[in-house]
Image: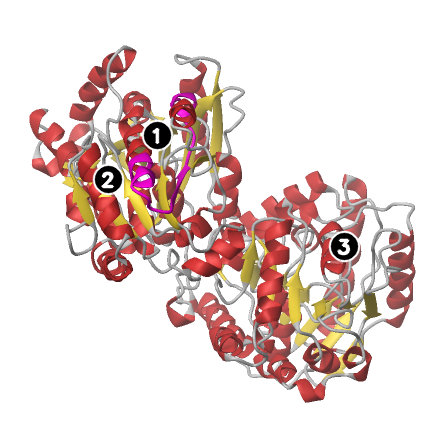
Amino acid sequence: MADRPAEFPALLVFADDWDRHPSSCQHLVRRLREHCPVLWVNSVGTRQVKADAITFRRGLEKLKNWRRGLQKVDRQMWTIDLPMAPFLNLGVFREINRQLVTTRLRSILCQLGLESPIVITTLPYVGWLTRGLRRRRLVYYCTDDYSHWPSADRALLQQADSDLTREADLVLAASQALLNQHARAKCRRYFPHGVDFAHFARAAQATAADPEVASLPRPRIGFFGLIYEKLDFDLLTAVTERFSEGSLVLVGPHDYSPPGFAKRRNVHILGRKPYADLPRYLAGLDALLLPYVDDPMIRQSGPLKLRECLATGKPTVSIDVPEVRLLEPHVRVARDQQDFLKLLEQGLAEPANGVEADLRQREVQADSWERRAELLRGWLAEMLHSANGSPAAILPDGQRNRADVPVVPHPAPRVNGQRRIPKRSHPRRVLHLRTVSGRGGGPEKTILNSPRFLEGKYELRLAYIRPLGDPDYDMPERARQMGVALADIPERHGIDLRTIWRLREEIERFHPDILHAHDYKTNVLAIVLGKMHGLKVVTTMHGYVSRGGKLELYYRLDRWALRLMDHVIAVSEDLQQILLDLHVPPARRSLILNAIDADRVRRNQTVEEARRRLGMAENRLVIGAVGRLAEEKGFDLLIRAVDQLLHDGLDVELLIVGEGPEHLHLQARIDDLRRADRIHLLGHRTDLKDLYEAMDVFVLSSLREGLPNVLLEAMAHEVAIVATRVAAVPRVVTDGVSGSLVPPGSLEALAKALARLLTNAALRRQLAVEARKTIETQFSFAARMQRVCSIYDNLLARNRDSDRLAPALGVRDER
């Protein structure tokens, strides 16, 4: 029998093979086994059975391991390989495996004296295989979406994941995307990977480099980890071609590489190395890579290697993954292959063991596996003593956390003609409704960023209505990158009755407490659906940028809907005035200006660095503007103002980012002025951050506005501002302090303000610094979402007050 503290039960862990490679679960269990005994069950496999070399090799390994039986690792830990039949997709084999697994495990657990353990699994199948076992709690540690694993049975794994999520007492998600993907869990926690910091920090000692690496030509560019199908070998090939005099070093098990890759002159695949020796191999490298393919599995993951790379202090370049972006600028995140190569050049140009290396190490030093294990131990202890089995701990270092439990569906069922009011539990749910075309606009940034700031309080889902066949529509991908659940609703024409039915399906599936609309059309739909389903209805007024024609009819319908809303949020004073004119009572309206997440939106490089990255001329003054190419944005006026500056001899260039109906008109204006070499319509861009950082002046030339997010973004990136005095802009930009304000529609005033800033670098810098301070102190996204949360709270509190009157109205309360 194991010698263990009586107050903490044993752990039964299902994960990858214990001695195969150091996974995140292994790192945790190495720390947890100090406090309790552990039986580790080696991988039950996620690959389909195929007639290929990998399956054959793994099959032989399993046959060998099955014969070994129970293996003792140390005083408090054992490992076992369980015999299993293949073809889990067939119900009969699944049941055979369940009987085999439970019978064998019952015997082993009894033999070791580890009855009723806490079960922890990283493998979705385990929910099906262990239902016959006695257990104290079930924890699903979700580190990857295995349905996208090479050779996986996708449909089977998705079903297994869904079933396990519902059954588990706690779901741990290694990334924000995986956290949102498991919204149906009883309880879930954001649990990013840790790092064995002291171990990998040894790689900063270049003198300790292994001779196998130290003898290779420089620059030495490296990757460590499994070499398999999920690496982008086209990208790695491009690295070998760009740095042809150097060496690409790959350290780790070699499962797959395309034909001919390993034979390239400067590719060095060193194979698997002992974990204890890894720092010596990394010490000889000049830069590290996270060169994965861009696919759903990678985008949803939180790469285990990320913090390990930063702990070495080495410059690190990664593909663009949402979880990796959280550690910018300590890791360089590339938007495409060319960007990857440029960032790698920058990293290699860094001085060895300089300030940047120290900052990288400091960023991850607190993310140790010891701290992660201690946190998990606390959650497990709380689960054991909790009546509902759900922990209520808080992540360290101010990281947000969730304790989600099921929400009772709407509408409440009727029994004998009377509505039963079921007991409700938090967090409540909000379904956002939005009509969009193309790539949307400024509101998308607010909507997509909202769920992160309401975690643990409200669960959000988006329903986006868009034209069928819209070639530029990209909201599902953007939502996926942000880890936000989104329902995509295509329409064949402007009035498509099927939209109502699709929205009803979403309501019945998601069971929201509140509908939150964002435009003319969804305001009307929200009112109708709110009445049908008994839901509270909120809208945000983002601004009326276009009027006239059939839009006038929509405007009238919208005014009707605004009067019926439970609450209306206006983002500027002029929109607030519309609500006053409509006699919307003060209790049902709020002025909440747009805001920005200043911690994530900030300058990470100088103007010169940004221009080098974009391949732009470094000495020319750059004016930038961002927005939909529509008449109300005043871009025609801006183009003429820049033409005047060029006539006056200023060496300037204008970049306009965005798409819209005025594109042809604006391009014709540029061509007529013969300024195509200096004025550029860039269309939609994914590298907007780099463009902001390359600007000397940002211009908002709008004739009509609400409160544009692009203005806040430019200010957060410390760019000097010239803006028109419209709507809420003067609330954000103080003339002469944090920017320069001009009357809307005045060509002379706009050109004069631009000339003043462009000829005075000190003034530009002064205004830019104050702009950033304004964002940090007055336009915090967290504070904005707290106000929105208060509105939700008040609406649902009033709903609960109404529920207390239910008995008098003949309504049965089953609380």
How far separated are the C-alphas under marks 1 and 3?
57 Å
Is residue 14 among what the camera can see? yes
Residue 544 image point, x, y percent? 24, 26
Residue 289 image point, x, y percent? 66, 63
Magenta region, residue range: 642-665
From the image, which quarter does the N terminus lie in?
bottom right
Ranked by sequence position, the earlier of labels 1 and 2 is 1
Numbered badge on residue 237: 3
Give the number of the mark in front: 3 or 2: 2
Left or right: residue 148 compared with residue 588: right
Give the number of the mark in front: 1 or 3: 3
How far separated are the C-alphas under marks 3 and 2?
49 Å
Q: Quadrant of the rendered structure where residue 351 is?
A: bottom right
Asked if disc 1 and disc 2 are in contact, CB closer than 8 Å, the reply is no
From the image, which quarter does the C terminus lie in?
top left
Q: Amino acid at mark 2?
A: Ala
Residue 366 image point, x, y percent? 48, 77
The residue under label 1 is: 411
Q: Quadrant of the rendered structure where residue 156 is?
A: top right
The residue under label 2 is: 751
Q: Quadrant of the rendered structure where residue 561 is?
A: top left
* Colour mapping used in the image: secondary structure
Is 628 above or below relative to 651? above
Is 751 above or below relative to 268? above
Left or right: residue 372 compared with residue 18: left
Give the number of the mark in front: 1 or 2: 2
Numbered badge on residue 785: none
